[in-house]
Amino acid sequence: MNSENEPAPAVMLPAIVLVEPQLGENIGMVARAMANFGLSELRLVNPRDGWPSEKARAAASRADHVIDAVTVFPDLASAIADLSFVFATTARERDGFKAVRSPVEAGRALRARGIAGQRTGILFGRERFGLANEEVGLADEIVTFPVEKSFASLNIAQAVLLMSYEWMKSGLASETDTAFSGPDIVPASKEQLQGLLGHLEQALEARGYFRPAAKKPKMVDNLRAVLTRQAFTEAEIKVLRGVVASLDYFSPKEKRGETYPMRKAAADRAAHGGDEGSDD
């Protein structure tokens, strides 16, 4: 893996080769899937409905750079003539002596060969019955997906999406990397949690929640059980303290208004021993 200061090595991107695709819409969805994961070279072998295709462009959902660069070939041999390594995708066991790889292995192998400057490709067959045996025979290795055997057929765009994803993932510093991350989460301390529970108990006591009085211990236990079921963060505790604090600041007789700052300050002093709270 590379350090953060090292530039990513140049890599030859694998070409996606569709053998006799039948529907322009499927070609467009393939282009979209490729663009999602940084692939751009799409080759078509004898597309049934010809090329170009406005249906394909519409289904590509603005992956126009892929559609505009499409190359069309009369047969598979010419489509892969300039490639040095080719995977064939299939859901069926084939006769022969070719190695069979998982998508994860195939993605890593394509990445390694691309970094080495080799031109590679991935073959995908017809929507109806996939690749013929002689077409698989033109590939170097087979890649197959771990699907349910009783329903193994994938839509061609789905298959391209899965392989494109594995290729992209193979180039990440960590396979768990994401495009963006959530905020830094600081777990609340037990002191903060107990402060919330104490604050809530006081607010409810002042409003006569614990009735009859003999049931108060059990009611408090229930509240604590609910509020300690998950690990709160500091920010969540502040939100909940603000909610409870609003019971101290406002009432049907004294709603939010001009006296709010004074009542808030007084309630904070009473609840926090002189420290100001927050109602964010």
Image: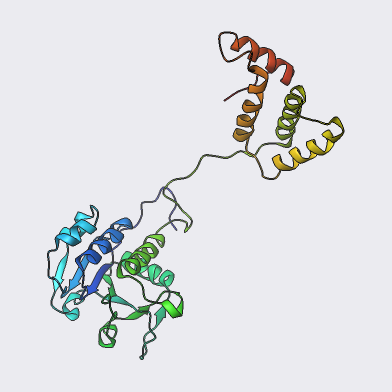
Q: Nearer the viewer, residue 169 or 58?
A: 58
Q: Quadrant of the N terminus?
A: bottom left
- Where is residue 104 drawn, in percent x and y? 43, 69
**Residue at the location (19% across, 66% down)?**
24
Q: Quadrant of the C terminus?
A: top right
Location of residue 144 (image quadrant): bottom left
Q: Is residue 274 visible?
A: no
Instruction: Answer above or below: position of 7 versus 193.
Output: below
- Where is residue 2 drawn, in percent x and y? 43, 55
- Where is residue 253 drawn, in percent x and y? 64, 13
**Residue at the location (61% across, 38% down)?**
186
Location of residue 263 (image quadrant): top right
**Residue at the location (22% across, 64% down)?**
25
**Residue at the location (13% across, 77% down)?**
74
Instruction: Answer above or below: position of 217 versus 69.
Output: above
- Residue lying at the far right of the rendered structure: 214
Coloration of the structure image = rainbow
